[in-house]
Image (cartoon, rainbow, N blue to C red):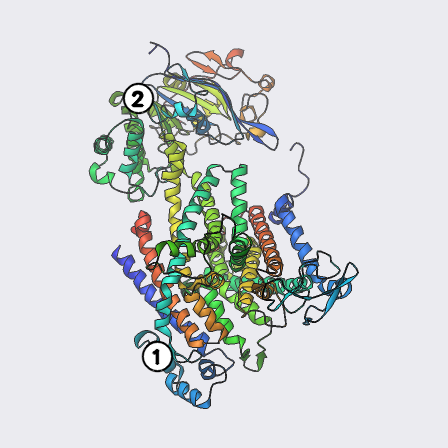
Amino acid sequence: MAGDAPLLDVRDLSVSFRSGGRDVPIIENVSFAVCEREILGIVGESGSGKSVTAMAIMRLIDDPGVTLRGSVRFRGQELTTLPQKAFRTIRGREIAMIFQDPMTAFTPVYTVGWQIDEAIRVHERLSKAEARARTVRLLGDMGVPDPERTANRYPHQLSGGLRQRAMIAMALSCNPALLIADEPTTALDVTVQAQILDLLRNLRTDYGSAVMLITHDMGVVAETCDHVMVLYSGRVAERGPAAAIFSQPAHPYTAALLDSIPPLTGPRPTRLPSIAGAPPAPLERPPGCAFAPRCHYAHAACDILPPLVRCAEQEVACVLPGEGKALPPRMTERVEA
Amino acid sequence: MLKSLLQRLGQTVFVLFGISVMVFLVFFATPGADPTARIAGKNASPATIAKVRQEYGFDRPLPVQYATMMKKLFITQDLTSYANRGEKVVPEIIKAAPVTLSLATGGAVIWVVVSILMGTVAAAFRGTWVDRTLMAIGLVGVSIPVFWLGQVANLITQARYHDTWLFSWVPPLGYVPFSESPVGWFKALLISWCTLSVLFIGVYARVLRSDLVTVSGEDFMRTARAKGLSPSRVLLVHGLRTSMITFVSLFGMDFAQLIGGGALLTEVVFGLQGVGRLTYQALSSLDLPFIMASVMYSAVFVVLANALVDVVYLFLDPRVRDGR
Amino acid sequence: MNGPVDTAPPGPWQTAFRALGGNRSAMMALAVLVLIVVLSLIAPFYAHDIAHTDPFRANVAGSFMLDGRAVDIMQANDNPLHLGMTPAGPTWRPSAYMLGSDSQGRDVAARLLYGGRISLLISFSAAVLCIVIASIVGILAGFFGGFVDMVLSRLMDIMWAVPVYLFAISLSIVTISDGLKIGPFTIEADNLLIPIAIIALVYMPYAARPIRGRVMALRNADFVMAARSLGVPRWRILLVDILPNVASSIVVLAPLMAALALLTESALSFLSIGVQTPTASWGTIIQDGEGLIYSRPMVAIAPGLAIVIVVVALNVLGDGLRDALDVRETSKRGT
């Protein structure tokens, strides 16, 4: 394994689908990297292309109208051109994925244990009993009470939190180097959410897995991630170390997102600031900065697509830092008068 | 689980009672003519008519007539056919049942195998010419009147191409009991099995394909792919198994209906002396007791078979098992 | 896409019609149906002015002109015993016995057109009647729920359990000999209303169940709940919120029901308990042809093909309608 090379290196990934005789871009030139044992948060509103990015990496989009460009390298190996059959040995074994809704993510007619056994036995030559032993151990590790019995239950018999734990157990069954978690907590209760996030945070020490955490919740990112990438309307708005971005966001959109997290201490503001308007649909995306129509700082220079430039510790797709008008550092403990 | 079984049992008993009342009313309370004359048959003597009236209690109120009828059908089983010189009806039906059973079973085997193949292949090749061709064949299949298809099959295998190598093995129309000669039984029924299954192949292949297509959009299919399973394993083990739930419940109903007389047209065209063909012969002689008995028995059979299918269903779908 | 939108967006029905118009196979199916209806309508003209024949009168001793020669309708056949006579085969000329003659010397082509009138009349009327009854039953059961639903649903369960053909046979056999007397009204045994009503009745549960399911789903839909909480009267909810939304399900059912009705009509007529002589339908013509199947197969093949073509066209049209109206639940049976 090459020493410093990132585990996953995504360069200029674009996905578009044909509709009404033209290509509609869903994501454009998205680049990022995930290192070993790192937790990367991908943040954005619904429709910003977070899930599509994950699905594109896993090659789970098989609509014939969809075209995919760019490069996805995993441990130096190009994934986008790998034959389907060879890719299947990576999918589930090296890169595993869990989904938003644990209610519908298990096949209803098989027991949870059967489905985890299947995931194990597809990649490793193990007997049924050996696979089941590992399944039970994994379920136990994930904090599932009475794992032997739970393994023999059907998905509909388990609560949402248990199902998501089982889902994570299944994803970890072959010790993947990278776990892609697509909104893993959105469908769960707040208390269960915190437990599942805990679980994800500890994966790197317990299993040595890197995690790509997709979420729309800046609060989740703050609690969990090392690095953050903010997507807006299919393009990277800003990316960099979580600490840097949280203390000094460089993109007005990131700043606005952060402002919409309720403060943990001090009196609660009567109204959280919100971002007026909605992100543009892929077809109505402006040629320049996509956030400009909703941005306080928008001016003539924003009509040209801003490139990703380095600004302090992070990289940002905004003209403001270049114009010497960087956003002020954020007062994390700001108290409204 | 026990609770849902008991509930199902209660429902079954209720439907059985309802059917017997409905069939009884259709035959004896349809406004129009005197049921006595209908039972006694065409040109019956006044003596026969008087005997029938007394036997069935047509001079008494409807509930009494109903009770009398049910007793004659199911308990004493001595319902008599007047058009057919005093033949007892119920034993005749029981005697003809193996023919119908053979016809329906063989047809069912063919249609289940072929339709699963067709539906799965069409779903796997969704949107391509393979899919379109298979579905077009299915559509034509559901559009052919079975009795006409039988005639055309007879025309080809019995007359036009009978002397070619392809169909020279086809025996003349009629039934050969399995106990007499298994090979003869098979040969005698093969063409009628194929004819009978055409309609169902069309229906089931189309239903299965659309179920598989719906299922392939489900989250759990995506999970299965993300696990690294091969496309065929995803389609067969996860997709097909889930779609089989609908398939099996449809199959139970259709198979029961076929055994209960739905194969009548096929039996008539191929000269197979099953319950259906006996019913057909009773139609031409206006032998009402026979028709009523066959309708009643087949309805009872269908209801019981449906109840059985529901129990099988409990084992197929864990969600239903828990009375979700 | 660019520029202000100055016209109202098309309504759902308009969109559906456009989608249907763009569906090539559905349009072809519609064209075929129209063609067959027109052909059936001109049956008297064909029989009287082109084929010069009376398709309802036996003509075993007659002859017709073919290439300037008189040909006997009933011909001595070539079997070694010279038993019986074989009717004339197809001439493939519209002027006389294009599809040959049946065992009573009648022109099969002309009878086919007349049969089409009856078969189509019965199947279309039965489909309409069936859907009207099924809509009433399905909407009542689905909308009112509770006791009404329980009674109607159990009734449908019961009807469901009797095999369709046996149910139809039972109803036919009791009405076929004596007709139907309801109070002061008498319906004669040969009245076409009898097969129409029978077919409509036996398929009622097949159409009513999906409609009931759709109404129940709608009844619990958010927008209906909202209307209710605003105090909108029930009848108004039924007319304004439910009916227009069920209408698409009902429209989709229509061609499928017509197809089933046509198949059932032909089967009943084939069993000689449907359309009664002297009226002809495609089913009765197939039955006429049964005895001639090995010698003059065209008598049975022609009406059978006609049925297949019409049923395929109806099914294609039904599929097209379903796609255009985007109705999901179309299973003809089961819940």
Callout 2, which amino acid? Ser
Residue C88 at least partly seen: yes
Q: Is residue A223 above or below residue C258?
A: above
- The residue labelled by disc 2 is A209
Task: Label 1: state its secondary structure.
Answer: helix
Q: In this view, does A207 lie to the left or right of B227?
A: left
Task: Name the spot of residue C165 as percent of width and height, x first.
Answer: 48, 65
Foreground pick, B60 / A111: B60
Task: Name the spot of residue C40 as percent of width and height, x first.
Answer: 68, 61
Most extreme residue toward the front is C80
Most extreme residue toward the top is A3
Task: Label 2: state its secondary structure.
Answer: loop
Q: Which chain carries label 2?
A: A
- Nearer to us: label 2 or label 1: 1
* Dot 2 alpha-carbon crowd within 10 angstroms: few under 14, some 14 to 19, many 20 or more: many
Task: Name the spot of residue A175 as percent of width and height, x first.
Answer: 28, 24
Q: Do circles 2 and 1 both sit on a common chain?
A: no
- The residue labelled by disc 1 is B67
Q: Which chain carries label 1?
A: B
